[in-house]
Amino acid sequence: MKLPRCKLYALVLAGLIGAALSAAAHAAEKINFVTDYGYNGRHAYYFVALDKGYYKDAGFDVTIVRGKGSVDAIHQVGAGNATLGFADAGSLILARANDKIPVKLVSIVYARPPQAIFCREDMGVKSVKDLVGKSVANPAGGSIPDLFPAFAKASGIDPAKVHWVVASSQSLPALLASGKVPCIGQFTVGEALLKAHIPQRLVRLAYSDPGLSYYGNGIIATGATINQHPDLVRRFVAATIKGEKYAFAHPKEAGEIMHKYHPEVSVAIGEGETKAVAELAEVKGQPLNVIDPKRIQATLDVIEGAFKLKSPVKPDDIYVAGFVAK
């Protein structure tokens, strides 16, 4: 039976409208994700999630933005310039206590302290005691200088007797290699990068050495995003964990993917830093990235023991559980 032309037009129009509405409903959500510092091999798993389509499958169009330090990432997320970010738990506590920035952790990637200071042994630094009177180069607004008082206190040295020099994260290996500074701040996951650029013998002074035990970096979001868009947060965390698992199982390929997106990061460095992240992230008997309330309290204890906070901070102020599937 032949339909009247007007009815045929109506059916075609209805189909077009339906298709348009369906496409709009399934359009990928555009979100910005800010790193802690720049683009490094330690961030490879985010680019694995991007490259493998894990974020796309979760309904996202993700732009990974270069951060300028954990403090910067916290401020960017707090100001709404980035939907989610990657930042240090200790810096987040300080930002909450001193600046009342309403940002919280939704998953933990570095389940162990990543902060460290690397020094050239031939410039007179063989132990933490040798830091006294020396200079340490580090970008402004990072967790390494933020948490240094806690490390100094645990190590038995006066933090005021160590001098900090502000420098960009990209310049740190060259500064140490040239001898312009005897020490630089660097996460333990950056050791492969340093050894590739610095021929001299390095001494690693990890913040965990004197017994400090606290959380490092995790994924952060504002309280408003968590409350208003919990499914968005849950899907992003799940897609990122999928990227982590693949990267940890295939570190060389993770390095290749990182190099593809950022050629300044060599495949070898991407591979080495991915392996180092796996060592920090994997906790026996626990799901990847899950937040342990006891470890949150331990992190608070470390910060409160080293700093005079402007306002008290409770565990509920700095994290929200339930975004990591068990």
Image (cartoon, helix red, strand yellow):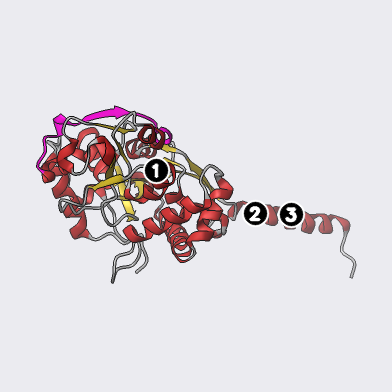
Q: Amino acid at mark 3?
A: Leu
Vertical position of residue 69 compared to residue 294: above or below: above
- Give the image quarter of residue 169: top left
Coordinates of residue 166 in the picture (x, y in percent)? 32, 28
Point out which mark residue 23 bears. Answer: 2
Is 150 left or right of 255, judged from the image as shown?
A: left
In this figure, which residue is indicated by the disc labeled 3? 16
Crowd class of label 1 (few under 14; some 14 to 19; many from 20; radius 10 Å): few
Q: Amino acid at mark 2?
A: Ala
In this figure, which residue is indicated by the disc labeled 1? 199
State how far apart marks 1 and 2 are (Cα): 55 Å
Is residue 60 at least partly visible in the picture?
A: no
At horizontal 42% and vertical 38% (from top left) the residue drawn is 67
Front-lying residue, 13 or 290: 290
Front-lying residue, 67 or 76: 67
Q: Residue furthest front?
A: 122
Q: Secondary structure at mark 2?
A: helix
Task: Report the mark closest to the observer, 3 or 1.
Answer: 1
Q: Secondary structure at mark 3?
A: helix
Front-lying residue, 157 or 260: 157
Quarter containing the N terminus: bottom right
**Per the image, is 26 magenta?**
no
Upstream in the sequence, badge 3 or badge 1? 3
Q: Which residues are magenta?
A: 156-171
Crowd class of label 2 (few under 14; some 14 to 19; many from 20; radius 10 Å): few
